[in-house]
Image: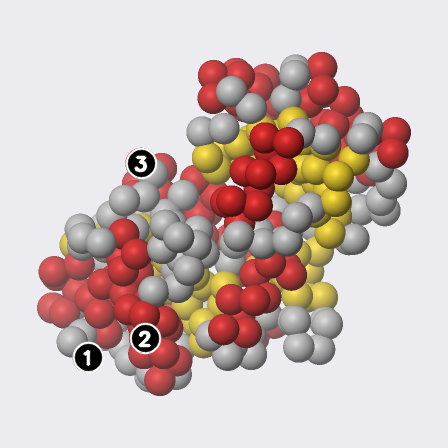
Amino acid sequence: MFQIQESGKISAKKMRHKQKQTYKLAAIDLDGTLLNPDRRISDENKAAVARLRSNDIEVVLASGRKHEDIFRFHQELELTTPILSCHGALVKDPLNGEVISNRYIPVSIVMHLLQEAIECDLSWVVYDERGVHLCRSEYWLSEYVRRTCFDRPNICDSVENYFFTHAEKVNWMGDEEAIREQFRRMGDMYAGKLTTVITDPDHLEFTLHGADKASGLMDLTQKLGIAREEVLAFGDSNNDVTMLSWAGLGVAMHHGTSQARLAAKMISSPGDEGASFARAVDSILGPA
């Protein structure tokens, strides 16, 4: 198992000079981190995952995507670990179906969020136990498929036609200015009840308060008996902030958001966005 120790925010170039600290688990975001702009895993990043595993570091995928969406990348990498989906609201082993933790939004709050979206002239998506459900919007339907490269969601003609028992995540989509305005308003309205985050300028996403990638990682590492100091985390976006700051070594991609870069202890070196993750791993593990 490779060892290295970090102290405060450090550059990739200085990693090789640091005293060693054991790492046992690496949590990796998908979009903007493991995936390239075409939503695929580059050869460089796939090799970097293999390097981590060959150094006895377990690899866990942690994304805002739905569990089933993440699972296809899990299979491509031949992983056997649990998956953190919906920003960590659900931690589930895809091989035996064990649910390690599930922090879902109460039905009454979900329904209020959908009504609020309609009143604000925004579109919505819900990730629930049956899949992904989107209000009728040809534009956002095509955007969902384009941005995820995954299956078409179920289409709901109205809130009244949408039935579910629990939901891990709700998304609002719309004009960037409206999203910023609603981020502030809804953050105040649901303080202490929901976690709100802008993942893309036109996406405002809601999970249960305390349901984020850090809490999902805490649930998983407690089960596995892995200490916080033994965890690596790689991400690029606002929904990665909690795990980047919580992990023993949080690594932000060079092209990441300002919030992600501020939360991380290390930033990957500049270069091709599709291989930023691979460069970060090389900086930590040393030349291949």
Report the residue marked by disc 3: 258
Looking at the rendered image, the disc whose residue lies closer to the viewer, 2 or 3, is 2
Residue drawn 80% across the image and 46% down it: 166
Rendered location of residue 36, percent (x, y): 36, 55
In the image, residue 2 above or below residue 107: below
Rendered location of residue 19, percent (x, y): 18, 71
Between 187 and 276, the one lying in front of the other is 276
Marks 2 and 3, how far apart at CA? 27 Å
Dot 3 or dot 1: first in sequence order is 3
Q: In the rendered structure, are the residues bearing label 1 and label 2 in contact, judged by CB atoms less than 8 Å apart?
A: yes
Q: Amino acid at mark 3?
A: Ser
Report the residue marked by disc 2: 47
Rendered location of residue 128, percent (x, y): 75, 48
Marks 1 and 2, how far apart at CA? 10 Å
What label does residue 288 carry, if any? 1
Quadrant that contains the C terminus: bottom left
Q: Quadrant of residue 269?
A: bottom left
Crowding at dot 2, Cα within 10 Å, few <14 / some 14-19 / many 20+, comes out as: some
Marks 3 and 1, how far apart at CA? 30 Å
Looking at the rendered image, the disc whose residue lies closer to the viewer, 1 or 2, is 2
